[in-house]
Image (cartoon, rainbow, N blue to C red):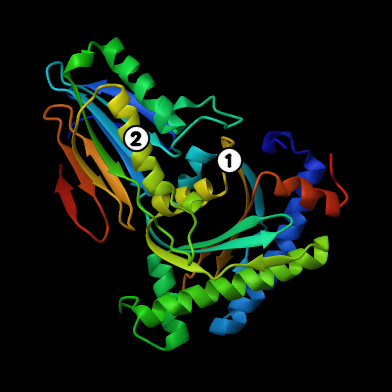
């Protein structure tokens, strides 16, 4: 199925599962760091692959990325990306450390666990909605240039198309900026399966 | 500050001195740089995948190592470069994420490096130097005056190859 051929109704359905999934994930994150987390209405975008790094602030931006592959009848990928400065704030508020400390091994584990919890709560919502089961892999963390991190995930999509479908949610917190992006990237053939379970297949 | 042309992901560009070429955030992708020192014409391709064979949608030749090299050479010749004078440098092909029990399919960085070398060899273009592998991102800038390739990383400093 070509991502460019999605109808407005189908995009709405994807936006809605994004909404509920991300709502769950935001609640989980909020409980974890014991602060109020706001989220933006998810955006469902079909982007040319070359434009994806710009969507998170440019290919050279230093970011932390937690990546999980999701096994399912509708295989997908989950990537939680946030600027390193924000990752430090989340880690520090979890571990009770100073704000300027570097992220150490414990911090890396904490970030992976955060990715795990976000992905789990997101996928729970998606599973309830679609009656499909989703099994996330162990999370993997990389702290580096946004372009390098995003391109690897896109390639691992088994990407043969020049476009990728992205369900993107931005998390925000008022006093301290801990904003980050949560991406659900279904593999091209998974989209049909997901849309069929939602009753909006083409 | 000299002029620089940006090369995006799955993209390629050729230019003549004093216009340099840059591509940012190479992960498992590979940056293939070709340079003709006589005419000071350079070319840079940011490839994502090793081979266009068996791929349904392969219109974008810059996306694959096996097709990008020939298009890049043709673009450079249009600017006045001579095929016999061309040399190459490559960078990238790292693995950003590590999963246990990683299969061959996952080691895309290594396969991109191999395919880039193969494509250059088939085009009879010698590779002068390379900076490949690892688990970190790279930004590369090709200086079309000297043919130097500047490699910028976040955790491993800068170097020129």
> Can residue B19 be seen in the rendering of this structure?
no
Q: Which tag is nearer the camera, tag 1 or tag 2?
A: 2
Q: Which residue is mark 1?
A: A47
To which quarter of the image does residue A201 belong? top right
The N terminus of chain B sits in image quarter: top left
Q: Secondary structure at mark 2?
A: helix
Residue drawn at x 22%, y 46% as measured from the top left: B151
Q: Position of residue B106 (x, y in %)?
A: 48, 53
Of the pair A151 and B15, the residue shown nearer to us: A151
Q: Position of residue A196 (x, y in %)?
A: 84, 49
B96 shown above or below A176: above
Which numbered disc covers residue B53?
none
Residue at disc 1, secondary structure: strand
The residue lying at 39 percent from left, 41 percent from top is B112
Q: Residue at x 19, y 56 (%)?
A: B157
> Mark 1 falls within which chain?
A
Within 10 Å of disc 1 (Cα), the crowding (few <14, some 14-19, many 20+) is some
Residue A30 in percent (x, y) is at 60, 79
Q: Residue furthest right?
A: A199
Q: Chain of mark 2?
A: B
Q: Quadrant of the C terminus of chain B?
A: top left
Q: In this view of the protein, which residue sits in the foreground, A67 or A169?
A: A67
Q: Which residue is mark 2?
A: B116
Apparent side of residue A13 relative to residue B61 in the rendered image (left or right) = right
């Amino acid at each position: 199925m070509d991502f460019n051929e999605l109808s407005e109704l189908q995009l709405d359905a994807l936006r809605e599962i994004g909404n509920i999934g991300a709502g769950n994930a935001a609640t989980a994150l909020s409980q974890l760091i014991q602060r109020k987390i706001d989220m933006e209405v998810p955006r469902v975008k079909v982007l040319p692959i070359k434009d994806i790094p710009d969507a998170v602030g440019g290919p050279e931006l230093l970011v932390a990325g937690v990546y999980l592959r999701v096994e399912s009848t509708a295989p997908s990928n989950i990537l939680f990306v946030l600027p390193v400065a924000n990752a430090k704030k989340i880690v520090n508020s979890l571990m009770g450390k100073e704000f300027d400390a570097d992220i150490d091994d414990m911090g890396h584990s904490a970030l992976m666990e955060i990715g795990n919890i976000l992905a789990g709560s997101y996928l729970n919502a998606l599973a309830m909605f679609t009656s499909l089961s989703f099994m996330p892999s162990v999370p993997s963390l990389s702290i580096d240039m946004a372009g390098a991190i995003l391109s690897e995930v896109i390639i691992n999509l088994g990407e043969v198309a020049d476009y990728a479908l992205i369900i993107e949610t931005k998390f925000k917190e008022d006093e301290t900026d801990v904003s980050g992006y949560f991406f659900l990237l279904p593999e091209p053939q998974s989209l049909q399966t997901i849309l069929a379970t939602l009753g909006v297949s083409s | 500050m000299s002029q620089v042309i940006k090369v995006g992901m799955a993209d390629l560009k050729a230019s003549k001195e004093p216009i340099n070429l840059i591509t940012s955030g190479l992960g498992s992708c590979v940056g293939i740089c070709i340079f003709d020192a006589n005419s000071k014409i350079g070319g840079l391709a940011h490839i994502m995948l090793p081979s266009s064979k068996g791929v349904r949608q392969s219109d974008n030749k810059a996306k694959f190592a096996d097709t990008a090299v020939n298009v890049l050479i043709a673009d450079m010749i249009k600017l006045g470069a001579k095929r016999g004078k061309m040399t190459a440098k490559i960078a990238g092909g790292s693995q950003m994420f590590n999963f246990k029990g990683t299969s061959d399919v996952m080691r895309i960085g290594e396969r991109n490096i191999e395919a880039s070398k193969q494509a250059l060899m088939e085009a009879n273009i010698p590779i002068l130097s390379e900076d490949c592998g690892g688990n970190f991102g790279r930004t590369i800038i090709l200086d079309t005056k000297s043919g130097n390739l500047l490699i910028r990383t976040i955790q491993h400093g800068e170097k020129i190859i």
